[in-house]
């Protein structure tokens, strides 16, 4: 299709910042088209459109990873290759977050809360109730970890059964994080304006930086873990689809997928520790 030709994700020269820019463009386009066609259901439809835009890129990336897994000589070289891809996909996700956040800040307040990010605000409210009082407690950490492990399992399952399906969960998470960041920034700007009487350019940058740091300090590790898990399920899915379940490469690909899932769990444990014990100290 035309989109794949424009992006050329299988090209030898892949640029991480190109993935980041694509993420911004895709997320903004998904929101604007959703508002245009399905205004009252924008908060859900924009995720579906973003997934539709991203699937060709994600699928092509998984095909490339599966092919290289077959020919790379050992697990160390596979993990080295995977690390590059995870970096690219993480920048794609950050592009989603930035694009959604920009729209959150520039669209009218009532449109943001009641239409564009209404479902995301509901999700934030539910999560806040589940992890209330989580700071500095092992119980809170376990609650956070349990929730995040559920998402990781969904990433593996979606990626395995739908190939690039993990992009759905990651797109949804990007919109929720953007809603949280955008809300934090708007509240911070309102407080600054109330106390100072005006808001200078330096205040804007300060509040925006705090907003991103507040949620990405631990969030970036969570997203890396989800991408690792999605990559594991995705390359296994692609291998079975291309060569059959009893192909000669299945043990090699399966072992690589198992290592990736284990690595994803370890990263997620670290992310939970940061969210429960470090982020509350900083913010």
Image: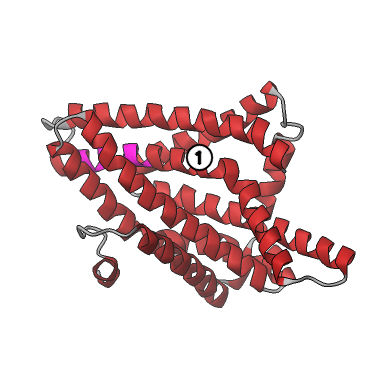
Q: Quadrant of the N terminus?
A: bottom left
- The image shows residue 190 at horizontal and vertical percentages of 81, 64
Neighbor class of circle 1 (other Cα within 10 Å; few <14, some 14-19, many 20+) is: many
In-image side of 184 versus 75 (left or right): right
Q: Which residue appears at 60% of the width and 57% of the height?
A: 178
Above or below: residue 202 compared with residue 213: below
- The image shows residue 122 at horizontal and vertical percentages of 69, 51
The residue at which mark 1 appears reads as: 221
Name the residue furthest bottom.
36
Q: Which residue appears at 21% of the width and 60% of the height?
A: 11
User: Dividing the picture into quarters, in which one does residue 21 lie?
Assistant: bottom left
Span highlighted in magenta in the image: 230-239
Residue 221 magenta:
no
Above or below: residue 124 compared with residue 183: above
On the question of residue 26 being in view, the answer is yes
Q: Which residue appears at 48% of the width and 71% of the height?
A: 29
Given residues 8 and 116, the one toward you in this image is: 8
On the question of residue 157 being in view, the answer is no
What's the magenta bit mostly, secondary-structure-wise? helix
- The image shows residue 117 at horizontal and vertical percentages of 64, 61
- The image shows residue 235 at horizontal and vertical percentages of 27, 41
Q: Quadrant of the C terminus?
A: top right
Q: Which residue appears at 36% of the width and 64% of the height?
A: 18
User: Dividing the picture into quarters, in which one does residue 202 lie?
Assistant: bottom right
């Amino acid at each position: 299709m035309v989109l794949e030709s424009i992006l050329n994700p299988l090209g030898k020269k892949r640029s991480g910042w190109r993935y980041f820019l694509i993420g911004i463009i895709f997320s903004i386009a998904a929101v604007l088209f959703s508002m245009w066609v399905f205004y009252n259901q924008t908060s859900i439809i924009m995720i579906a459109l973003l997934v539709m835009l991203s699937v060709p890129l994600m699928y092509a990336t998984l095909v490339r990873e599966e092919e290289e897994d077959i020919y790379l000589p050992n697990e160390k070289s596979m993990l080295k290759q995977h690390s590059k891809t995870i970096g690219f996909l993480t920048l794609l996700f950050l592009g989603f977050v930035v694009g959604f956040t920009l729209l959150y800040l520039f669209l009218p307040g009532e449109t943001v809360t009641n239409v564009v990010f209404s479902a995301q605000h509901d999700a934030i409210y539910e999560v806040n109730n589940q992890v209330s009082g989580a700071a500095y407690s092992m119980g809170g950490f376990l609650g956070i970890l349990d929730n995040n492990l559920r998402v990781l399992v969904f990433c593996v399952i979606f990626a395995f059964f739908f190939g690039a399906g993990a992009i759905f969960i990651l797109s949804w998470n990007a919109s929720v994080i953007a809603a949280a960041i955008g809300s934090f920034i708007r509240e911070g700007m309102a407080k600054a304006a109330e106390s100072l009487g005006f808001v200078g350019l330096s205040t804007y940058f300060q509040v925006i930086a705090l907003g991103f740091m507040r949620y990405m300090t631990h969030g970036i590790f969570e997203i890396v873990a989800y991408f690792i898990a999605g990559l594991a399920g995705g390359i296994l899915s692609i291998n079975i689809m291309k060569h059959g379940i009893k192909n000669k490469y299945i043990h090699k690909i399966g072992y690589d997928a198992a290592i990736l899932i284990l690595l994803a769990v370890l990263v997620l444990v670290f992310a939970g520790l940061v969210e429960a014990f470090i982020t509350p100290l900083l913010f």
